[in-house]
Amino acid sequence: MSYFLFRRLLSLLLTLLLATIVIFAVLEIVPGDPARLMLGINATEDAVAALREQLGLNQPLLTRYFSWIGGLLQGDLGRSFTYSSSVGELIGERIWVSLPLALLALTLSTVIAVPVGLYAAARRGRASDTAIMAATQFGIAIPNFWFALLLVYLFAIVLRWVPAGGFPGWEAGIWPALKALALPAIALALPQAAILSRIARSALIEVLGEDFIRTARAKGLTRSQTLWHHALRNALIPVVTIMGLQFAFLLAGTIIIENVFYLPGLGRLVFQAITQHDLPVVQGTVLLLVASVVLTNFLVDLVYAWIDPRLRKTAQ
Amino acid sequence: MTGQRSDTGERLPEAGSEPVGLARRLLASRAFLIGAIITLVILAMALISFLWTPYDVTKLVIANRLKPPSPSHLFGTDHFGRDIFSMIMVGSRNSIAVALVAVGIGMAIGVPLGAWAAAKRGIADDILMRTNDLIFAFPSILSAVMITAIFGPGAINAIIAIGIFNIPVFARLTRGGALSLWTREFVLAARVSGKGAARISIEHILPNITNLLIVQGTIQFSLGILAEAALSYVGLGAQPPMPSWGRMLFEAQTMMAIAPHMAIFPGLAIILTVLGLNLMGDGLRDALDPRLRETK
Amino acid sequence: MSYHRFPTGLAAALFLSTALLSAPALAAKDTLVMGVVLEPPHLDPTAGAAAAIDEVVYANVFEGLTRINENGEVMPALAESWEVSEDGKTYTFKLRSGVKFHDGTDFDAEDVKFSLDRARADDSTNAQKGLFSAIESVEVSDPQTVVVTLSNPAGSFLFNMGWGDAVIVAPESADGNKENPVGTGPFKFSNWAKGSAIEITRNDGYWGDAVALSKATFRIIPDAAAATNALLAGDVDAFANFPAPEALPQLEADPRFAVVQGSTEGETILSTNNSKAPFSDIRVRQAIAHTIDRQAIIDGAMFGQGTPIGTHFAPHHPAYKAELIDTYPHDIEKAKALLAEAGFPEGFKATLQLPPPTYARRGGEIIASQLREIGIDLEIIPVEWKQWLEGPFKGDYDLTIVSHTEPLDIGIYANPDYYFKYDSKELQDVIAKLNVTADTEERYKLMGEAQTIISKDAVNGYLFQLAKSGVWNAKIEGLWKNSPVQANDLTGVHWND
């Protein structure tokens, strides 16, 4: 187990290191001089040169890379070019929108998908199963931003139950904040729930067909006992994997959904920073998103190993 | 996932082993039939749009703007007085082209890489898998945004951005399928007879994973349609005057209250296309993988 | 009995409902959430060109010697009065007493001298240094009096001192104004949640009449759809410059909102690179002018909001020459003939770069479609503002669409290096004469001549005067109808019940 952990941890660190190189390199190619962009059209060449010096843009590539990494290790993500505040501060403000949103969506999609998947598996082949499966096919095919538009139209404009967008901030209270996140979370969650419920269904069906389940049934356990004690635990493996993948997907999905609902989250921050060539913000945010994906995958692997001890051995 | 199933010792169906049976199974699959019909209709629509559309989509007739659906404009008109049905027809070309080329890129690069890694193992395999992890670590829409920040928005850059994410998908699938095949007797026999790794990959490995690739290709195709729509929606896909479904949705969103038809029809077009491809993919997988069929 | 009970019940209901209705009146609303499309890069109006800065701080946080009111008139501000010498070169400003900056420091003549000298210094980062170019010296005669001497008489000097770029700042706080603006205005800066909102609160130590609002929030909503939704959902009380003209009919029909159409100084034009072939050929520019259908652009891009223009001048100005709209009437055949004469019988290809605003993105699609009729095939390139400033505004472009929102800015045509790259001796002479003319009648005549020259030369495609569509809660009073300068002056805003 510890060897397995060590190996996974090593590969996690390696991926992160490679990611920093890729992010840094990609942003080097982005055209446009950040100093000139910051100062605007009336700036003199001298002023631009001075700012380049001040921002450290004149140093060699490697020096800049290592000073960025050095700063990262000390928790310093640099200063934003467009806003005069630190990247860490900006991310710190925004993450309290994006993270709750992604978690809310993940919870929502799991809460919907697992029971639906189980129900469909239990009623396999019957009309209700067929109906559910047809519905999930639709769910998968719906673009979440289109779904978001319809939700806004119905619940915010016509019915006025929830705000159409924006975020009052957590200081305005839990309830108003949750209300503002409700539609974005639903828009993100429903298409994901469709995928997850299909996975849950087929995983369960597969497990139910296996020998040990037949044995359990033969030993006299009832159908529901079998389902709960044996089948579920084994069916969880693919479900957890997909949930892990979904978390990454949901974080990325917030980029578009935050733009639909003008939520001041990480997605909109990175989107704005890219169009404004605010390199330190782009680097910091992208790295954070990448790190969260890699970390989630790592956690999924751990859960995986915990659920199915066999995998610990084969992973070697 | 599909690739890893072969370790159960199941014999993979070999290429063209039972074409008649396959065709019969496909025709018996309701999912496949519905999916195939939808896909064919969309494809036909895209092809017909080259020759004919009810109205010219490049000509703006401002006086005719925001008309609700009617017999003369089945899906109504947009804010420039263009016929939405015609725009959906022409827009289908863009969606299909971008998704198809992106899948093509993924296969053309991913499959050889995966086969190579499976044949060589060791370091080559490690490097490939690490690179895969790396690419998977970047949320695709984020990278697409970064790519378009470098090269500027446009259909070509959308293709590149989506294509890059198809490479590891196919590489991983090919590697998984190929790894188990390399231990099989007929491959061992080929090795003994002195065939090189490249030749074995082409002659014995690839034909045996074609089914997997086709199924995955269909799925990636539908994901590509969704990804293209998302990119166009944020303004990073095809540029006007070329109509695209995602852009139509972007333009529709300020007009939801006065012209909801502008949002509804392009959205339905996306859903229908993705649905058709997914159903077809499911039907294909069931028909090609006998084991899955049993569990149904 | 029931016959009696009914009216009683009704009366009770009426009483109750009036009681409920008047309840909010007791606690009169004194906060405002205002939507703005662009987030300012920082909050120092003396160090940036972005209109988004003035939209937050002008008249609210910072004040100048003079201020410009809703109708474009010059009003006293920190200077309570002034005298102009006979030769028009010496301005003596009498300053208000008892004025304090938000950080508690006193305002006096030294602050005025500091601000003006800072703005016109060689290393100044003021975006509108031209406003101060006429100043020869600034002298402090006593703490309440400043004497400004000009090198030559400038009719617009008092107006210039009312710009956001000419506000008075304190030497103690000037360097920190980008993040923490310290002015003399009736509102103090209180918070800026980056990417989301900027908050200002009432300054209780204000020298003038206290403002009715205790707090105002500028919420940044760059997206037109989100702007509409935010208004409908009640998240935002007002949009001084509403970005989605297509939603106006719906908002007008809604009794909760007041939709107010005002004028702006924004001439929206198809800017043309006059130094680049084939646009350097006047026949090509004339062909474009003959092809453009202004009304279709106004209807299609702005949903009818806007006034067609035939030259670079605001239609509401008395010197505007309305007849220039017909200099090149819509005539496709004539356009084709001109294009053929210029050597392009089959047309040609060119690029059209479009900055983010709706008028540009949508207007560009319509213009591209119109020009296709005469064979000009335009590739549409959407650009962000920063790219626009780096590219087209530096002269690297074929065609672009932009609204020039500075008041009375026809003088830009006299600068051959300006991004139109238009070099006309005739026009330069007229503008030179205009700059030294003080007589109003004579000035209007010269302005008319300049308008005619650029219209005849078809320097740019003249499209329409941008309309200002203000949308706000019907209970709000005191917001500007017109926008002579880009500002959201909240000093007179209050809720009406």
Image (cartoon, coloured by chain):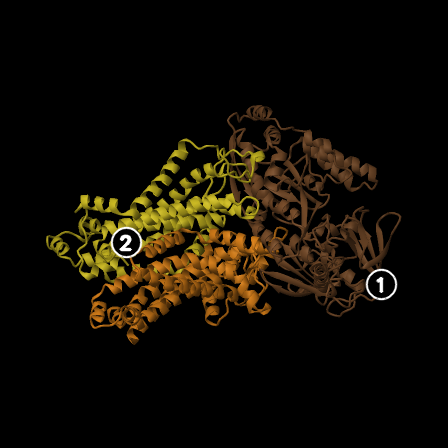
Chain colours: A orange, B yellow, C brown
Query: Up-down: is C470 above or below A192?
Result: above
Q: Does residue C15 appear in this view?
A: yes
Q: Position of residue C357 (x, y in %)?
A: 59, 47
Q: In the rendered structure, which amino acid carries the disc numbered 2? A: Leu
Locate the C terminus of chain A and report the quarter of the image it occupies: bottom left
Residue lying at 75% horizontally and 52% vertically, measured from the top left = C132
Residue C353 or residue B294, whichever sits in front = B294
Locate the N terminus of chain A and report the quarter of the image it occupies: bottom left
Dividing the picture into quadrants, the one containing residue C120 is bottom right
Query: Up-down: is B224 above or below B45?
Result: below
Q: Position of residue C328 (x, y in %)?
A: 65, 28
Residue under numbered circle 2: B113
Query: Up-down: is A98 above or below C440?
Result: below
| Residue lying at the far bottom of the rendered structure | A2
Q: In the rendered structure, which amino acid carries the disc numbered 1? A: Gln
Dividing the picture into quadrants, the one containing residue C65 is bottom right
| Residue lying at the far front of the rendered structure | C1
Residue under numbered circle 1: C144
Q: Nearer the viewer, mark 2 or mark 1?
A: 2
